[in-house]
Amino acid sequence: MPRNMSFAMTTDQVYDRSKDVTRRFGWWFLKAGDQVWAVEKAMGLRAGEKVKRISLIRIVSVKAEPLNAITQEDCAREGFPSFTPHDFVSMLCGHYGCPEDKLCNRIEFEYLNAGDQP
C-alpha cells in the first residue's frame, strides 16, 4: 500500500499538475520507481476528517542537496514559476525556521492518475 505524501502548501499546483518536483527534509528512504499517494493533508486531521487523495505519483529520482541549490527551473517545477531561487528558499525557511543551506531531498515525480478529486 503506497504511503501518503502531503502537499498542503502546494495543493493547487498538484491539482493543476504544474508541480513535478518537491523538496522534503525527510523521505530519505524513497527510491526511483516507488509509488506514493499525493494528498492534500496527511497530519493534523480533525476528528472525522479523512485524507483527500489527489493523485498516485511515481518517484522518478531522488537527490540530496542543500535547499539553496535550487535553480530557477526548479522553482517552476515546484509550482512557483514567478519565484526566484531566493524567493523560494525564503518561503521555506520562513515556514520551517531552517537555515538556507539545510540539506533536503529533491524528489522528482510523475502523475499516474487523477486520484479521488472532488
Image (cartoon, rainbow, N blue to C red):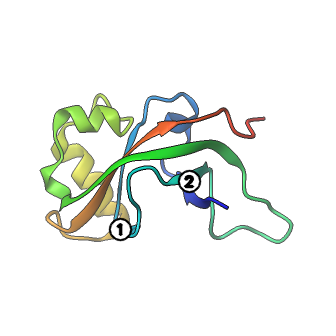
Identify which residue is drawn at 34% across, 67% down.
Answer: 25
Identify which residue is drawn at 16% across, 46% down.
Answer: 86
Residue designated by label 1: 96
Question: Marks 1 and 2: CB-CB under 8 Å?
Answer: no
* Residue 80 left/right relative to 19: left
Type of the residue with mark 2:
Val
* Residue 54 left/right relative to 108: right
Earlier sequence position, callout 1 versus callout 2 = 2
* Relative depth, front residue between 45 and 104: 104
Quadrant for residue 51, please give it: bottom right
Q: Is residue 8 visible?
A: no
Residue designated by label 2: 36
Q: Residues within 10 Å of mark 1 (few under 14, many from 20)?
A: few
Label 1 residue SS:
helix
* Residue 32 left/right relative to 39: left
Locate the N terminus by quadrant: bottom right
Label 2 residue SS:
strand
Q: Residues within 10 Å of mark 2 (few under 14, many from 20)?
A: many
27 is higher (above) or lower (below) than 72: below
Identify which residue is drawn at 16% across, 63% down.
Answer: 100
Residue 112, image x and y in percent? 58, 35
Q: CA distance from mark 1 to mark 2?
A: 23 Å
Residue 48, image x and y in percent? 86, 66
Type of the residue with mark 1:
Tyr
